[in-house]
Amino acid sequence: MKSMLWFVAGVAAGFVAAHQINQTAPGREFFESVNAKARAFGAAVADGYHERDAELRAGERSED
């Protein structure tokens, strides 16, 4: 229970720190950069998933 309290306190402190950092121009640029990279990564994962799904579906059709 004590470790859960520390975990929650750490998460809360992280949110407060991120909010304070986001108030500055360099902080906003940093978070925009992180956000763009996360979106690009998510898009790459989704593209790979759809590509592999199409390959598997094409393989199912050829076995029929």
Image: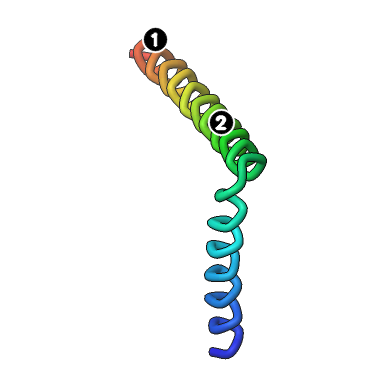
- Crowd class of label 2 (few under 14; some 14 to 19; many from 20; radius 10 Å): few
Q: Amino acid at mark 1?
A: Ser
Q: At numbered mark 2, what does the secondary structure look like: helix, strand or loop?
A: helix
Q: Which residue is mark 2?
A: 36
Specify the farthest residue to the front.
24
Q: Which residue is mark 1?
A: 62
Q: Position of residue 60 (x, y in %)?
A: 38, 18
Which residue does the image show at 49% across and 26% down from the upper left? 43
Which residue does the image show at 61% across and 46% down from the upper left? 24
Q: Position of residue 47 (x, y in %)?
A: 48, 22
**Image mark count:** 2
- Report the front residue among 35 and 49: 35
24 on left or right of 42: right
In the rendered image, the vertical position of residue 9 relative to residue 46, given as above or below: below
Q: Position of residue 16 (x, y in %)?
A: 55, 64
**Quarter of the image where one finds residue 38:** top right
Which residue does the image show at 57% across and 35% down from the upper left? 32
Q: At numbered mark 1, what does the secondary structure look like: helix, strand or loop?
A: helix
Q: Amino acid at mark 2?
A: Ala
